[in-house]
Each structure stands twice: as C-alpha cells, then as structure tokens.
Amino acid sequence: MPLTPRAGREHDRQILRLAVPAFGALVAEPLFLLTDSVIVSHLPAPALGALGVASTVLSVLVGLCVFLAYGTTAAVARQIGAGNTLRAMRQGVDGLWLAAGVGLVIIAVVWPLAPSLVHLIGAEGELARQAVTYLRISLLGVPAMLLVLAGTGVLRGMQDTTTPLLVSVGSFALNAVLNLVFVLGMGWGVAGSAWGTVLAQSLGAAVYLALVFGRHRAPLRPDLAGIRAAGSAGVALVIRTACMQVVMTIAAAVATRMGDDQIESHTVAVRIWTLLAFALDAIAIAGQAITGRTLGAGDVAGTRTATWRMVMWGIGSGVALGLAVVVARPFVPGLFDAGPAVAGELLDLMWVIAALQPIAGVVFVLDGVLIGAGDQRYLAWASMWTTLAYLPAALLVVLGGGGLTALWLALGVWMTARLVTLGTRAYGRAWLVIGA
C-alpha cells in the first residue's frame, strides 16, 4: 500500500518509538544466554551439550506460555485504544495471576519428569545427569519467568516498551555476573549457571509486580472469571507456540542423535538464531501494540498502512542481519572455543542462517500484527499446517543421513511455509476486527 512521505514518516515514528526499546529488551535476553553458553563452554564436556539439552526443554515449557506476554499485550492495547484504561489494567492483572498459577503447576508436573524429558531429547549418561541438574534448578525460576512475560505484556499494551528494556537489561546483566561467579569463580558447574538465571529472573519479576501494583495502582484482588477468560483466550496461542516448539524440539533431537559435535554446534547455532529472531521480533512487538490500539480505536486504514510499513522494516532488517551474520561468520567458532569439528559445522550453518533472515523479517512482523489483531485461531491452524510441511523435510534428513546443514535447510522449508500462510492472511480482510 503506497504511503505519502508525511504518512510514512508518522508511521515510522510510531514503529520506532515502540520497536527500538523493544529491540533492546529482546536482544538483551539472548545476548546474556549467549554469555551463559560462552561461560559454560569453558567447562569440560559435556557441560555445553547439557546446557543445550536442558535449555531445549525449558524453551518448550516457557515458550508455550508466551501467550502471557503476547495475549496480554493485544488485550491491554485494544482497551487502551478504546479508551478503557481501568479495564486494560484489570486484564493485565488477570494475566499476572494466571502466570503465577501456571508457573507453580509446571514445577509440580515437570520436576519428577525431568530425567524422562532429557532422555526424550536423546541425552544419556553424564550428558543426561548434568542436563537434569540444570533443568531442575531452573524450574524453581519458572513462576518468575512467567510473571516477567505477563508484566512485559501489560506495559507493552500500554504502549510502554522502554520500562521493559530497563528491567530486561538489569536482570540479564545480573544473570551474566552471577554466572561468572557461580560457574567459574565458585566452581558450581552447570548448576551455577541455573542458579544465576533463577535469581536474576526472580528480581525481574519483583520489579514488574512493583510497577503494576505500585506505579499503576492496579487492583491486586484476583478475578477468577477474568483469569479463566485469559486462559481460554490463550489456548490458540498455546497451540501456535506448541507447533513451533515441536519443530525446534525435533531439530534438537535429530542433532543430538548425530553426535556430541553436532549437538554442540546446533546449540550454538540455535543461540545465534534466537538472538537474531529476538532482534527481528522488536518490530513484531510494535505490531502487536499498534495493531491492538488502532483496531480498538476502529482505525482500519491506519492498521493497514502501519502493517505495510512494518513489513518494509522487516525486510530491511532481515537483509541487514543476514549481512551481519556473513561478516561475523569467521569469528563465531573462536567465540565459543570450538574444536575443529564443531567449528566446521558452525561455519556451514552460518550461511543458512544468514540466507533465512529476510524471510524471518517478514514472518515475525506479520505474526505480531495478527497477534495484535486477536487473530489467534487462524494462527493456530496456520502453525499446524506449517509444522506438517516441516515434518517430511526433517524425515528426509534422517532417512537420507543428512548432516546439520541439511537439518537447517529443513527449517528453511518451515519458515517459507510460514511466510506463505501469514502473507495470505494479512493480504485479506478477515483479521481486521475493530472495537474492544
């Protein structure tokens, strides 16, 4: 959709006002996770592989709950757009109570299942033992992680992405310092890395609770009907996220069964992919907040033009990040103290990761726009179809004896399928539902 120069600049200002702080907050997390990997990589094998296996399980658990941030952002933004500030805060509080409850349930259910889950990923022996240690300690921080997600969603829905940036940088900087002290200084191994994350996340959750209930004077009392409604609205987003986690879990399982060098290389590659994905997701976060607000205010034309502008930003950002990966490629193995075999795998994977960035830029933007529009049901169905597109590609890698590069090309098939399904939906009008 063509824009006048003045309209384009106005949309750019709105996007950048939300996306730039969101970028900082999103990149802070994978940057410090990368720092964790760098620190743990100095421990004897299989410490880094154990971190990768346990992180895969945690990513599934916490990733399934990302609706606490995304759904809350969309719901609060719609109420803000419609001028219902009190209702917006009520929905935000419902999300916080839901986060606390879900976190406690996860601890109770997953703790006894930890050995089985790491074995399901393919870990055995010492690799499995260290992975279980990391996973069980990290579970203690899951309620805090989920409260951080919900608290972030509340503030983003209120069109505030600067405060989450400050909280994110502070908590993850603390995480990096604690990891250095616990892992290398005190010699706690992978357990030290897990404890550092738990303490840092707990502090971050405390800050969000103070902000929502203190600064914004939100009602503390839980509303059971509202909590149930928030949970029901999040089901479709859980399905969407579950499909994405299935894809990444299958990839981790295939890589694990290829050998120790391959799972270490895959672990580092996933960290880099996550860093880039979080960077691109900054525009998607702006998309959630802007789309929810404009549709809540009944502004369909503004939603359309903002979406087109964000897609252009997504393409440009993807190209820029792809080029950055190419430039950084020769230095990646040394950063992780990789041996010759792991270094060779990583250098090959960097080409695939770089090539996928422009596609990812569009996919993440459209995903955020449709979440902001409350189009969760379509996103759930689309995610199931794109997962079905990925499975045959992954199966060919296994049956054909392909290596890590082939596995990541299969992930490229999945991303292309997401581009098609999201692009088709965004081109239509069914998702443009106005009002609170």
Image (tube, rainbow, N blue to C red):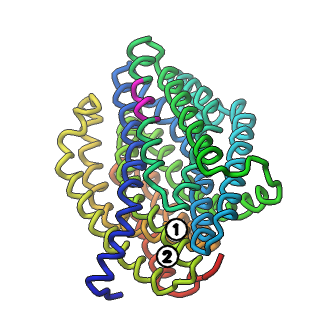
Cβ–Cβ under 8 Å for marks 1 and 2? yes
Residue type highlighted by circle 2: Thr
Check the picture and name the quadrant holding the C terminus.
Answer: bottom right
**Residue 45: horizontal and vertical position, in percent?**
40, 22
Q: Position of residue 123 (x, y in %)?
A: 53, 32
Secondary structure mostly seen in the magenta stretch: helix
Residue 327: percent from the left, percent from the top? 17, 50
Which of the two discs, 1 and 2, labels the residue nearer the N terminus? 1
Q: Which residue is under mark 2?
A: 421
Residue 383 magenta-highlighted: no
Residue 386 appears left or right of 323: right
Q: Residue 54 versus residue 317: which sits nearer the camera?
A: 317
Q: Quadrant of the N terminus?
A: bottom left
| Secondary structure at numbered mark 2 | helix
User: Looking at the image, which is closer to me, 329 or 32?
Assistant: 32
Instruction: Categorize mark 2 by other alpha carbons within 10 Å: few (<14), some (14-19), many (20+).
Output: some
In this view, the residue in front, 212 or 23, is: 212
Q: Helix, strand or loop at disc 1?
A: helix
Q: Is residue 130 above or below residue 77?
A: above
Give, as a single range, the part of the protein colored magenta: 171-177
